[in-house]
Image (cartoon, coloured by chain):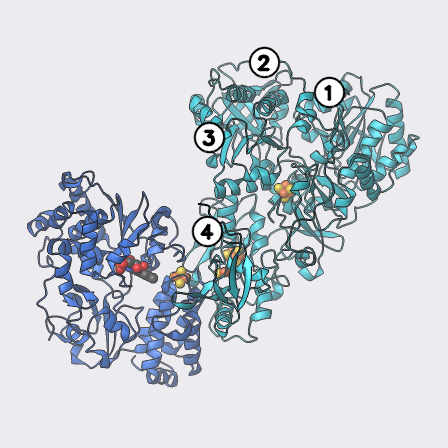
Chain colours: A cyan, B blue
Amino acid sequence: MTDVIKTTVTLNVNGRPIEVKPGELLIEACEQAGDYIPRFCYHPRMEPVGMCRMCLVEVDGPRGATLQPACYIHVTDGMNVTTNSEKVKKAQDGVLEFLLANHPLDCPVCDKGGECPLQDQTLTHGSGETRFIEEKRHFVKPIEIGKLVLLDRERCIQCARCTRFSDEVAGDTEIAFSGRGDLIEVAPSPTKPFDSVFSGNTVQICPVGALTAKPYRFSARPWDLEQVESTCTTCAVGCRVAVQSSGNRLTRILGVDSDPVNHGWLCDKGRFSLDSIDGNEESRDLLSAATRISQPLLRENGVLKEVTWDEALEAAASILRNAAQSSDGVGAVGGASLTNEGAFAWERLVRGVLGSEHLDAQFGDGLDPVVLQALPKATIDEAAAAKTIVTLTGDLREELPVLFLRLRENIVRQNSALIEFGFGPSALRSLARVSLAIRPGEAHLAARALCDGSDAPKGAIFTNEELEEARQHIGDSGEGVVFVVGRANLAEDSSVLEEAIRRFAERYPNATFLVALRRANVMGALDMGLAPRLRPGRGVDVAASGRDTLDQLAALRDGEQKALLVLGGCLIGNVADAPAARAALEKADVIAVTGHGGATLAYASVVLPAAVQHERRGTVTNIEGRVSAVTPKIVAPGSAWPDVAIAAELAELLGQSIGLTSVEQAAKAIEETTGYPALSVMNDELHDGVVVGRADASSLRHALDPMAFPGIRSTEAVGIASYTGSTTTVLAHSSGVTKGASLSDLTSSPEIEVGIADAYSLTLYASRRLYDRGIAMQGSPALQPLIPSSALALHHVDLDRLGVESGTVVKVTGARGSILLPVVLDEHVARGSAGIFVGTLNSSGENPLDVLFDPEHLISQVRLETR
Amino acid sequence: MATLDAPRIVSSRAEFEDSYTLARYLETGGYEGLRKTLTMFPEAVAAEVDAASLLGRGGAGFPAGRKWSMLRKSPVSYLVVNGDESEPATFKDHFLVERDPHQLVEGVIIAAYALQVAQAFIYIRGEFALGLERVQQAVNDAYAHGALGSKIFDSDFSLDIVVHPGAGAYICGEETALIEGLEGKRGFPRIKPPFFPAVTGLYGEPTVVNNVETMSNLPWIITNGGAAFAALGVGKSTGTRLFALAGRVKNPGVYEVEMVKNTFRDIIYDPRLGGGITDDRALKAFIPGGVSAPWFGPDMLDLALGQDEVGAQGSMLGSGSIVVLDETSCPVRAAWRITKFFSRESCGQCTPCREGSGWIERAMYRLEHGGGREEDLALVLDLCDNIAPGLGWPPQQTTICVLGSSIPSSVHSAIQMFRDDFIAHVELGRCPHD
Ligand SMILES: Cc1cc2nc3c(=O)[nH]c(=O)nc-3n(C[C@H](O)[C@H](O)[C@H](O)COP(=O)(O)O)c2cc1C
Ligand code: SF4
Ligand code: SF4
Ligand code: SF4
Ligand code: FES
C-alpha cells in the first residue's frame, strides 16, 4: 500500500478557499491569501506562544466557531476561518485597548516612536479615545539590565519576544518574566547580568520602546534616518544589515532577515561597533584604533606628517620601485578588511605590476590556502541542517557569533548530532553528543585515531567509547556530515590542524567542510588571489611559490625582503608573535593602507588613508563563499580613497596600468575575467547574494514583516514588490572558479612531531574572543569598556594540583619570560592545558601572548608558580 | 431537612484525633481497597471507576474514568495529583490532606495501578505546611508498609510517589501550569490544543491530572464497587461531595453530603450543617461553586447540589466552595475583592486577563470606595465582554486558560443582581455598608 502524501491543504478563509502547505501556521496562511492579521508576540523566527491574543480569529470546531490565536494554530484540511466578523473585530480591538490601558504616553520621547508596531496598529485599528481613567501602572523608568540594554518596564507589553530570543535562539537564560498580573515584568537574572553577545537583538525585535540600546538611545528620530542594505564585515559570517544614518553620521545597524545567513540576528559587536567608524574625533594617537586616518601621512624626521596624496603616492611608489629591483624584495600582507574589488586591485598591483608572489590576506592565524580552497565546501544552511556536525574549531559564539546561532538552532530543533573536538570553552558544549577533549597539539592524533579506527592514542584524555560513538555518528563515508574547522589555538602551529583536516577529508569523501575563518572578508581576499599560489576567481597555481605572512616577516628580518605593503588591519595587533613582527618591521620599509590607527603605524614610512566599511561600494564573500553587496551609507572622512583608486594610482606611478578606474569597473573585470560573481551581485537586490560555484544555493531575499522587523525601512520596498512566491530565478554563475584546487594537489606533509609536554608544564592555548582589542572594539566608545582583561583558564584538577583558587594571581613563565595573571576555573578547559584569550592585556598592560608564545616549537608550554 | 443517610465516603475518619496516622488508617479498613485492586486487572479497576461515574472534583467536573481512557498510549506516562487549592473560601482539599493523607495516597496508588504508571506526583499548595508534612509522612509510611515502592504488597506492580510543594501562585492549580511548575519552570498555562495533558503532559509525556478529592474517593469505590457509588446521588452526579461552606453562616466548615439529594437550602440552613445565616439575617446571595462561579439569589436555594442541575441555571459547583452573603454584605465589595484576587493571580501571559482584570479591579475599587460613575457599569460590563465575549455560560474564551474567562462571573452577577447597590454607592460617593 502506498501512502498518499498531501502537499497542500485547502482551508476556507472568509468563505474563500485557499491552498497552503500542510502544517503552516494560520497567521502565515492568511497572510499569503492577502489577509493580514494583526499581531504582537508572533515572530516568524521564533516558536509561537499565543500570548498577546491580538491575532484572535474565529475557527469552526466541534463546539461551533471559537476565537483562536492564528499564530498558534496549524492549518488543517477543510478548516473554516473567519477573520473579518464583528466578533473578531471586537476581540482584537479589545486586546489593543487593553494593551494601551497601562501603556505610558511616552511616544514623543520614545526611541520607537515613528517605527513602533504598537503605535502603528493603534493608528490602523485603535479607537481615537481612551476609556481608561485609572492610574497607570508605574515602574522606575529605565533600568539597566545589561551593559548595552536598558528596560523601561512601563512600556513593556509582555510579548515575550525578548525572553524567547534569549532562551530559544541564543540559549541564554539571563532574562525572564517575574511577577504576576499586570505587575509582571521582564527581569534580569539576579545572579547573572544580561551580558549576552546577542543582547541587541532583543532591542531590535521588541515591538515597543521597552528595550532600548544604550548606544542608540535618543540619538535620532526614525523619520530623520536614511538607510541602505549592506553586509556586516565585522566578521566572516556576513550578516545582512540595514545601515542607517542621519546625514553623514552613522546612527544604527539593524539585522535584515536573510534566509541563508542570519535570520535577522546580529551579534552586539557587528551591531554596535558602528561608532568605531567615525573614530574618536579627539584621538590623535596614530597608534590607537580609535583614531581615524583621514589624510595621507609621510614620515619625515621620524614623525608621520600630513601630506598631499601626490606626495604620499610618490613616496610609496619610490619605496616599491626600489624594493622591486631585487627579486623577492617586496610583498604585501593583509586584505581581509578589503572588498573583493579592493583585493582584486591590490592583487593586480602586487602580482601584475610588482611581479611578487609574496602576498597573504591571513595573518598567520589561518590555514594553508590551498588546503582551504581544495576542501569540498558546505553552506551555512547545509551545516545547520546536517545530520552530524563535527567541530574542531574555537568557540563559535566568540568567533563567528551568528554561525553559532544558526548551528545551535538546528541542533536544538532538529536534534542533529554534534561532535566536538576541543580543549577550550565552547558555548555549544552542553549540546554536544560527544565531546572529545584533546590538548593543544593533539588534534592530528585524535583525527588519526578517528579515521583509522584505532584506539585513542596513549595519554589521550578522551576514551575509546567516545571515539567509537563519534564514528557511529559520522558513518562510513561522511554522508550528511559537515566538519566545521578552524584555528582554535594561535599558540599552536597550523600544521597540526591542517593534518587533522586532511585526514578527515581523505577518510570521509562525502563530508563537506565549513572553514571557520573569522576575519571579515578573508574568504573574498583569498578568492581574489591574496595568498601564495592562489589566483583571482578561486584559482590555484600549485606550481607557484611565495611567502605567507610569517615567511615575509622572517624575510624582512633577514633582509631578504625590503618593503612591505600592509593592506588594512593592524598587522602587529593580529599576529600571534607580535615581538617577532615588530623586529621585522623595524627593518622594513612599510607602506600602510588603512582607515584606522594601530601599532603597525609606528613602523610605517607612508600611510595611505582608505575608506572603510559603510563608506564604500563593492562585494564581499563570507565563510560559505556567498558573495553579497556592501553599500556605502556615509562619505569617508577627509580625503580617504577607495582601495581600487589607491592601487590604480600607484600602478600608474610605477609606469603600468591595472586597467581599473572605478569599483564598478573592478567588479566587471572580476566577473568577466574569472566568472566570479561581482558586478551582477552589486546590481541585484532580489537575492541574498550568490554562493560561488553553487547555483543551487541561491535564494530570494524575502519580504520582511514590519511588525517583526520594526525600524527596517526596506521591509516593504525591497522584496515584496518583486516577490512572486517562488525561488526559481537563479543567477547565471554556475562556476565562478577559474581553476579550482583539488585534494589531489596537496602533497601530504611529513608526519609532524609535536613533542611531549613535560609533567610540570601546561600546554598553552590562545583562543579568540569576540570582545578583543581589534578596531571594532577599541575604536568604539560604546564597546571599548566591555573588553575584558587577561586571565589564565585552568581545569579544576590543575587548580587543585597547584593549590590555588580562582582569582589568585600566579606567575606564568613561557618561552620569552614571565607574566602575572589571575587564574580562573573553567571546566571546559582540558586537563593539562592553560588558556588565554588573544588580544587581552593583564592589569599591567602586558599582552600574555607576547611573553608566552614559543616561536621555536609547534606548541607553547608554560609553567606556573604561586607567589 | 438535609438527607444525611448516605455513608461518609471521604470524611469517615474525621472524628479521630489521629486520623492521619497509618495505625488508625489500617484499623479503619485502610489499604484494603489497594489489596483488592492488586488482584484485579487494571482495566477492571478503571471500569469500576467508570461505573461509579466519578466526576472530577477539581472544578471542571470531568468524569475521571473518561479522562483515564483518553490517556495516549505511551511507554512512559505520569499521574499528577492536584492539591494546589488556592482559591479564596475553598478548603476541602486542605481538609483531606491534613486529616486523611493515607486515603489520598491509597487512592493515588489505585489510580496509578489502573493507569499502569510507575511514577506519580502529589502537588500540594506550599502554604499547607501541615498537609505537606502529613502527606509526606503518609508516603514514607506507605513505603515502609510495602504499599509503595517496588513490588507493592508482593505484586508485580511498582510505583513511586513524589510529594511536591507549590510555590504560592493560584495559577499553579491550573493543570498545565502545574505541569510547567513540576518541570521547574514558571507557572504559565499551556495552550490546549495541543497541550492536553493526556496527550502531551509532564515532560511531554501523556499525563493524567486529578484532584485530591477525586483520588480520595477511590479506596471506597474499589472496596464497595462502582455500582454502590453510582447508587448514591442522582443521574450524572453520583456519590457524595465535600463542600466548603463559608461566609455569613453560623457553622462554616467542610461537609460531605450526598449529591443531588440535598439542596443549597439544606447545606446552608440544616442545623447539622451550616445552621442558617449569622444572626438569623436574611440571605442576599450565595456563590455556589467558588469565585469563578456566577452568583445565585435566594430564589435558587432549593436547587439540588448536582452538576447539571446547577449548570442549567447558569453557574457551577466548581471548586466545591459555597459562600453566603447576607443582607448586610456589600455585593460591590465582594465582587471587587474577587476581581482583585484574579488580577493579582493572573499569570500575566494573556493581554485580556492581565490588563482586563487590573482595569476592572481599579474601576470596581472606585465604585466601592468612592469615585464611581454610573457609566462605569456599562464600561465594566463591556470590558468583561472583551474577556469572555457574550458573557454567557459557560463563558467563551479569549485567553489561554479559563482563569481569564472566570473574571467576569462575579462582576457580571453583582451588576445584574444588585444594580441598585451600585447606584447607591455612586450617589453616596462611598460604600453604604461602611
Ligand atoms: C485558575 C485555575 C485554578 C485551578 N486550581 C485548581 C486546584 O487548586 N485544584 C484542582 O484540583 N484543580 C484546579 N483547577 C482545575 C485543574 O485545571 C484540573 O481541571 C483539575 O485538577 C482536574 O482534576 P479533576 O478532573 O479530578 O477534577 C484549576 C483550574 C484553573 C483554571
Ligand atoms: S521588553 Fe519588549 S520584547 Fe520584551 S516582553 Fe516587553 S515588549 Fe516584549
Ligand atoms: S556575526 Fe559577524 S557578520 Fe554577523 S553581526 Fe556579528 S560580526 Fe557581523
Ligand atoms: S487567562 Fe490569565 S491566568 Fe490564564 S494563561 Fe492567560 S493570563 Fe494566565
Ligand atoms: S497571540 Fe498571536 S500574535 Fe500574539
A821 versus B247 height, above or below: above
Q: Residues within 10 Å of mark 1 (few under 14, many from 20)?
A: some
Would you say B123 lies left or right of A263 here? left
Q: Residue A133's x, y, as percent?
A: 48, 75
Residue shown at the point (49%, 61%) measured from the top left: A70
Q: Are marks 4 and 1 on the same chain?
A: yes
Q: Disc 3 designates what residue? A: A434
Give the letter of the chain under mark 3.
A
**Which mark is in front, 4 or 3?**
3
Secondary structure of residue under mark 4: strand
- Point out which mark residue A176 bears: 4
Q: Nearer the viewer, residue B52 or A147?
A: B52
Q: Are marks 4 and 2 on the same chain?
A: yes
Q: Residue A580's x, y, as percent?
A: 70, 21
- Asked whether the beta carbons under mark 1 and mark 2 sit within 8 Å of each other, the answer is no
Residue shown at the point (35%, 68%) measured from the top left: B406
- Point out which mark residue A551 bears: 1
Q: In the image, what residue type sits under mark 3? A: Val
Q: Residue B365's x, y, as percent?
A: 38, 74
Q: Is residue A201 visible?
A: yes
- Asked whether the beta carbons under mark 4 and mark 3 sit within 8 Å of each other, the answer is no
Label 4 or label 1, whichever comes before in sequence order:
4
Give the letter of the chain under mark 4.
A
Q: Residue B45's x, y, as percent?
A: 18, 51
Secondary structure of residue under mark 1: helix
Q: In the image, what residue type sits under mark 1? A: Asp
Give the letter of the chain under mark 1.
A
